[in-house]
Structure formats: structure tokens, C-alpha cells
Amino acid sequence: MKLILKQLNKMYGENHALRDFSYEFNEGVYGLLGPNGAGKSTLMNIITDNIRESSGEVLFNDINIKSLGKEFRRVLGYMPQQQSLYSNYTLIRFMFYMAALKGLERKEASEHIDMLLKLVNLYDVRHKRLGSFSGGMKQRVLIAQAMLGNPKVIILDEPTAGLDPKERIRIRNIISEIAFQKIVIIATHVVSDIEYIAKEVLLIKKGQIVAAGSPYHLCDEISGKVYEIKTTKESLGDIGKTYKIGNISRDEDNIYVRIVSNKAPSDLSYQPLKPNLEDLYLHYFDEVVAI
């Protein structure tokens, strides 16, 4: 099973939202990582055939998805970024409605819906109206509806947007559970969403892939560029003007600043650190900002 993107371009007037975007996805979890406006949602909408590309094509098992039509939509699950739910619907009514849109028989849908609502821990509130749900509960509803029909390709656009840390962890665990023998693509600008569950990460900037690969190999590429500086409150401002800062911590006597830099801060007291995905994000996307 494979999903292939070939030379995708998308123009919005003069804005080149995607530029010669090509990649091949196989079974596993993939993270699309980049700042807002990088082109992640545009890419998601092209894969799900919600918008048309300006040029290029999307292939599922070597066949253009436009030629597949309904056959591709049957194997596709999509969680949009916006929580556009019918607030007067109960959860169970909404799920049956979405199942009908996907062409599922009622008996098959009933069994599948019960299983999915238990998976996302919403079975006990299935008769409550969606308008009464919290943001985290609504996100779990959107994941559940994306899973209807046991899709082979699952697209999740900012699945943890606006959620507290507990809900983020819950949703990451759900994604790990549903990913077996599927292609799962997650678009996000939150590093922790994908750091421990993604097989491969694509870093996207201005509609292009700037780096791609496993989190381990990507982080290894910036080995020797991450440092911890020991400093004082008085010197913190100067460090912020010079280096990309990832984290600041302190004890009774000192302040410790995690930085990403192409050169060692030899004029300061420092020690090298092992890079993580957050450092990688900072390396590619963040500018030096004064504190």
C-alpha cells in the first residue's frame, strides 16, 4: 500500500502555497511539521480532494485518486482542523449520519460505531448533544468519525489544536492505536504531537520539504549544534539577541539556556547536548528573537 505525491503545486493568486511537492508514504505514521502558513493544510486538502492542485498528481497504489473517485474515498478517513460539528446532534446520531455518508450499512455501522466510541472513551456520552462537549471531546469525536469504515489512509489536520497537555497525550495514544497497517498523516506545528509516534517526519517551509526522514536521523543531522549555556539574568538578553533559544531553566544561583547554534558559544560557559525534534524545529524555522 502506498500513497504517492508527484510534483504537487498549488497557487492562490500570486501565492505559491505548494511548490513541486513530492513524497511517497507507506504504512506507518508520518508527521508534517512546520509553522502556520507552511502549506500543511493545503496539502491535506489536496490529498482528500477537497481542493484541486494547480499541477501534479496524487496516486494511491499507482492510480490517480481522481480516477479512483469513490473507491479512494472509501479507504480515506479525514479529520479536519475546524470543529464543525452539528451542536444539536447527539454523538450517536452524528456518527450514524457520517456512516451513512460513507455508505456503510446500518448493522455494520452500529457495531463499528460502538467500537470506535469505546476506543476514544466517549461511549458513555453517546446520547449527549455535541454542543455540550469540551474541545478535547470534540477532537476525539472527529478522530472517531475519521475511522469509520476502517480506512487505509487517515489524514489528521492539527489533531491536538487548543487542547491541554492531558488531552494531547490521550489523542497521541489513540493515534498510535489506530495506526496499525494504515497510512496515517498528521499535520501539526506542535512537535510533541509526533516526536514519539512518527515513523518519518517531513519539515515543510513555504510549501516545500526542507528535510525528511526518521526523527532519529533528522536529529542526528544537527548533532553538535545544540548546547546548554550557564548564565545570569543580566546576560540573558544578550544571549537572546545572538542565539536561537529552545528552553530556559534555573536553580538558586544560575540560569541554564538551551540553544541551537551552528557554532559553539565559546565565549560562554556551555556544554553540548543531544538534539531532539524541538531543536530540529528551531534549527529550520525559528529566527533569533530578542528577550
Image (cartoon, rainbow, N blue to C red):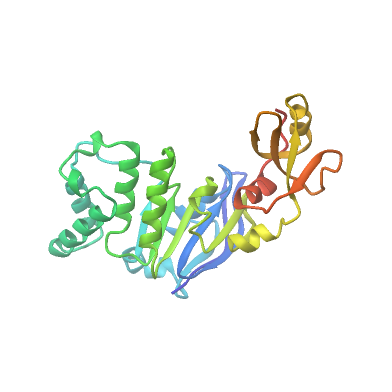
Tell me which corner region of the image, top left, top right, bottom left or bottom right, holds residue 14. Answer: top right
Quarter of the figure that contains the N terminus: bottom left
Q: Position of residue 189 (x, y in %)?
A: 54, 45
Quarter of the figure that contains the C terminus: top right
* Residue 119 higher or lower than 62, as above or below: above
**241 and 47: which one is in front?**
241
- Point 18% across, 42% down: residue: 90
* Residue 224 higher or lower than 287, as above or below: below
* Residue 194 higher or lower than 72, as above or below: above
Give the farthest residue toward the front.
252
Q: Position of residue 40 (x, y in %)?
A: 53, 50
Left or right relative to 176: residue 132? left
**271 and 30: which one is in front?**
271
- Point 56% across, 59% down: residue: 201
**188 and 24: which one is in front?**
188
Q: Position of residue 50 (x, y in %)?
A: 41, 53
- Point 30% across, 65% down: residue: 150
* Residue 78 higher or lower than 288, as above or below: below
Tell me which corner region of the image, top left, top right, bottom left or bottom right, holds residue 209. Answer: bottom right
- Point 82% across, 48% down: residue: 263
Judge whether residue 212 can be spotted in this image: yes
Give the farthest residue toward the left.
107
Q: Position of residue 63 (x, y in %)?
A: 44, 74
Give the farthest residue toward the top.
234
Judge whether residue 84 can be spotted in this image: no
Task: Please tell me how many numbered marks the rendered image carries.
Answer: 0
Left or right relative to 201: residue 233? right
